[in-house]
Amino acid sequence: MKVICALLEQHGRVLVTQRSENMREPLLWEFPGGKLEAGESEQECLVRELREELTLSVEPVLRLSPVVHHSPDRTIELIPYICMYHGGAIQLIEHRAYQWAKQDELPNYAWCPADLPIVQEYLALKRG
Ligand SMILES: Nc1nc2c([nH]c(=O)n2[C@@H]2O[C@H](COP(=O)(O)OP(=O)(O)OP(=O)(O)O)[C@@H](O)[C@H]2O)c(=O)[nH]1
């Protein structure tokens, strides 16, 4: 299963979202996004998911390294894109909370395990 997620940048910060109590991996933090559906591109998936989940308009600009993560019941391939903000105000349709995080704060979140390598790659890229 492929899951596409957005590292949405604005004013030097990155959007992070907290999963709800009733979701899988409750209360952990993630980058917003979701499952790739048949017939859509990775970029189309991201644009759709951010509109559906947060009512935001975004543009994917840079694909980072995919992460393959195994858990007992499934394997996901998590594919991150750095995205630019294009409009809209955040409404939490599915998530419990969101924050615009500074880069230095990113290591402090309780992340979904699959996201940890993405946080590391992003920080390395930005500090590079
Ligand atoms: N959107 C997103 N999903 C992630 C991230 N990291 C990670 O492990 N995931 C997992 O990838 C899946 C994303 O699919 P989704 O968000 O559309 O699915 P969902 O909550 O309905 O979950 P489910 O149908 O698998 O129970 C979730 O099960 C979630 O646990 C991430 O950074 N962003």
Image (cartoon, rainbow, N blue to C red):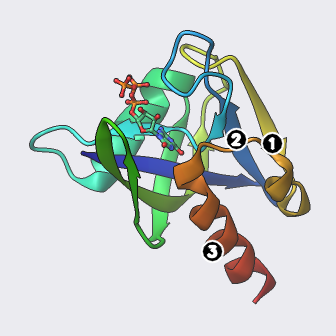
**Quarter of the render that holds ligand 1:** top left
Is the N terminus in the top left, top right, bottom left or bottom right quadrant? Answer: top left
Within 10 Å of the Cα at label 1, are there few (<14), some (14-19), or many (20+) other Cα atoms?
some
Is the C terminus in the top left, top right, bottom left or bottom right quadrant? Answer: bottom right
Which mark lies nearer to you, 3 or 2?
3
In the picture, residue 22 is in which quadrant? top right
Residue 55 visible here: no
Query: In the visual, does 24 lie left or right of 88?
Result: left
Q: Looking at this view, is 18 or 74 the one in front?
A: 74
Residues under labels 3 and 2: Cα distance?
Answer: 16 Å
Could you tell me which residue is drawn at 17 percent across and 45 percent down? 40
**Where is residue 103 shown, x and y percent of the image?**
83, 62
Q: Which residue is mark 1?
A: 100
**Where is residue 75 shown, x and y percent of the image?**
30, 48
Within 10 Å of the Cα at label 3, are there few (<14), some (14-19), or many (20+) other Cα atoms?
few
Could you tell me which residue is drawn at 48 percent across and 61 percent down? 81
**Amino acid marked by disc 1:** Trp
Sequence-first disc among 1 and 2: 2
Q: Which residue is mark 2?
A: 16
Sequence-first disc among 3 and 2: 2
Q: Looking at this view, is 85 or 28 the one in front?
A: 28
Query: In the visual, does 113 lie left or right of 5?
Result: right
Contact flag, marks 1 and 2 (Cβ < 8 Å): yes
**Amino acid marked by disc 3:** Glu
Sequence-first disc among 3 and 1: 1
In this rendering, the answer to whether 83 lies above or below 44 is below
Residues under labels 1 and 2: Cα distance?
Answer: 6 Å
Residue at disc 1, secondary structure: strand
Which mark lies nearer to you, 1 or 2?
2
